[in-house]
Image (cartoon, rainbow, N blue to C red):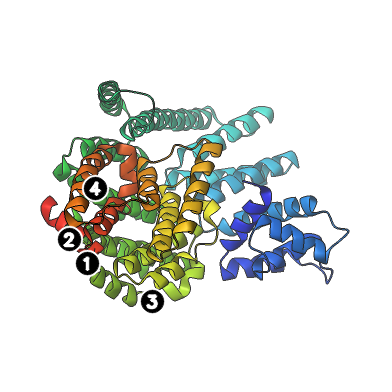
Amino acid sequence: MKKVDSVISLICSLSKSEKKHFYSHVVKDNTEKDYLVIYDIIVSGQAQTGREVKQVFYEHRPQGSFEVSIQYLYERLVETLVLLRRKKDVWYDLYTNICKARMLYERSLFHESFELLEETVELAKQYENNEALSVALKLQQEYLLSLHFPAVTREELSSLNVFQQTAFQKNTEIAEYFSLYMLLRYYLSGKGNLSEKERQKEIEKVWTKGLALYASCQSTDFELKKIHTFFQVYYLIDKQDNKEVIRLLKEIAGQMEKSKQLWTTPPVDYLVLLEEILKLVCLTGEYGELAGFLKRLKRLEKSNSLEFQINVRCVLFRYEVTPYLKKGDFQMCQKIMKSYQSTLFKKDQWLTPLRKNELFLYAALIYLGLQDYKKARRELAQLTFENTIDFFPLRRVIRLLHLILLYEAKEYEQVREESRVIRRGVTLKKEEGFKTEYRLMWFMTKRDLPVLKKEREAFWKKLSVEFQELYADKCEKQLLQIFDFTAWIEAKLLRKSLSEVLAERHVSVC
C-alpha cells in the first residue's frame, strides 16, 4: 500500500475525539504546515484517492514537497494514535513503561528506573503478559549486574532469576503451541499444494503433536488454555463434532468472563474472543446456540466508552441477522436493522474501518434480498476505503455484490468491464482467486442463457453439480459463509426470489 493510501485509511479510521486530539496535539502556532494541508484535504473530503490528494495539495502549495509532507503526517498520526492507546490497552502501557525505564537508566536515574520496572513486572503478572514480564525482568537483571548488585541479597537475586526462568518457560510453551495451532489452521484452510490425503495426514500429525505438547505444559495461564481450546475447536469442526465444539466454546467464554482481572479497559480482548466464538458457532451451523453468546456480548455494551459500545453493537447486529440471512428471512433482517438505526447506523463514525465495511455490507445484502437494489447500492457506496480489507474475503464479497447490483440494474456492459478489471487485478497482483468469483462473473457475462423453463432447469441441474464442489472446498467456504452467491444464480435461472431459494435450502439442510 502506498504511504498516501495508508494516511487516507488512518484518517478515515479516526473517531471524532481522536481527530480533535490530533489537531490539538500538532497545532502549536497559527502557521499552517504542509502536512496539515494534506490532513485538511482528506478530512474535508476534497479528495478521495491518493492521486487526487496530491493534485489538490499542489494547488494549495505549489512549492511544497508532497512526499516529505505525507511521510511526516503518517508519522505524526501513528505517534498520536499510539499515545491515545495508553491507559486503554495494557499492552501499550507495559511496553511504554519498559521504554521509559530504559531511558531513565540511560539518564542515570537508577532509582526511578527500578521503581518503574517493578511496577511493570507487577502489571505484567496481573495481566499474564509473559512477553513483557520477561523483558522487564531481563532489564532488571542487566541493570543490577552493571551496578554491581546494589543492596541486593542472594535470596532476592535467586527469586528474580526464578521469575525470569518461569516467564521464559511460559513464553516458550505458548510460542511452541501457537506454532502448531497456526500449522493446523493452515492445513485446515486448504492452502498449499497438497492432495486431500496428504493434507489429512499432516492435520493428524499436528493434532497428535499438539495434544502431547499441551499435556506436558507447566503453564496454567489463560492464554495457553485459549489457544488449546481453539486448537481443538477447529479440528473438531473439520470432523463435524458440533456438540463438542459448542461445549468447548461455552467453557472458554465462561472462563474469560470469570477472569475479570485479565480484562483491559475497555475489554477489547473479551470482545475479540466473543466475536471469534460467534464466527465458529456460525461455521457449525448451530445458529440456535448464538443467543447465549449474544447475551454475554450485550453485557459488555452496558458500560465502557461510547466508541466501544458502538463496536459491540456492530458485532451484535451482524450475528443477530446472520441466521435470518441464511434462511432468506429478509423481512426479519430489515426489522432488526431498523432497531439499530439510531444506536448504530447513525453513529457509524465511531466504528473501526473493518466493522464499518461489515455493517454496510450486511445492510446491502439485506436490501438485495428485499429486491430494493437502489438502497443496496446506496449502502455499498458508503464503503470508501477498500484497501483496509485487502487481506479479508470480505473484499471479494463486496466487489461481487457490486457486480450483482450492476447486473440487477441491467448495466451489462459495466458488468463486463468490471469483470475484466477484477480478472486483470487478480493476475497482476498474483492473488489466489476464488472459483466462486470466476463462476459468478462467467454467469453474469454469459450472453446465451436459456429462455425456456425446462432448459433453464436442466442448465441449473448441471451447474448445481459443479457448485457442490465449491461447498466442499475449504477455501471457497470462506466466501460462501458470508453470502451464498450460488443461491443468487439459482434464483436468476429458475426465476425465483432469492428469499425463496435460501428458504428451500435451509429446509433441506434441517
User: Between marks 4 and 2, how big is the CA–CA gap?
Assistant: 28 Å
**How dense is the environment of label 2, judged by Cα within 10 Å: few (below 14), some, or many (20 and up)?**
some
User: Between marks 2 and 1, how big is the CA–CA gap?
Assistant: 8 Å
User: Looking at the rendering, which quadrant does residue 451 occupy?
Assistant: bottom left
Q: Which mark is residue 341?
A: 3
Q: Which mark is residue 249?
A: 4
User: Looking at the rendering, which quadrant does residue 366 occupy?
Assistant: bottom left
Residue 268 screen position, x and y as percent: 43, 56
Q: Which sits earlier in the primary sequence, circle 2 or circle 1?
A: 1
What kind of element bears circle 3? loop
Which one is closest to the eye, mark 4 or mark 1? 1
Q: Are marks 1 and 3 in contact (CB under 8 Å)?
A: no
Q: Is residue 335 left or right of residue 107?
A: left
Residue at 36% of width from left, 28% of height from top? Answer: 180
What kind of element bears circle 1? loop
Q: Which sits earlier in the primary sequence, circle 1 or circle 3?
A: 1
User: Between marks 2 and 3, how big is the CA–CA gap?
Assistant: 26 Å
Residue, disc 1: 329
Residue 467 screen position, x and y as percent: 25, 43
Residue, disc 2: 503
What kind of element bears circle 4? helix
Q: Is residue 277 left or right of residue 17?
A: left
User: Between marks 4 and 1, how big is the CA–CA gap?
Assistant: 27 Å
User: Between marks 4 and 3, how big is the CA–CA gap?
Assistant: 31 Å
User: Between marks 1 and 3, how big is the CA–CA gap?
Assistant: 19 Å
- Above or below — where is 452 with respect to 146? below
Q: Which sits earlier in the primary sequence, circle 4 or circle 2?
A: 4
Residue 359 screen position, x and y as percent: 41, 64
Q: Amino acid at mark 3?
A: Gln
Q: Amino acid at mark 4?
A: Leu
Which one is closest to the eye, mark 4 or mark 3? 3
Residue at 28% of width from left, 40% of height from top? Answer: 470
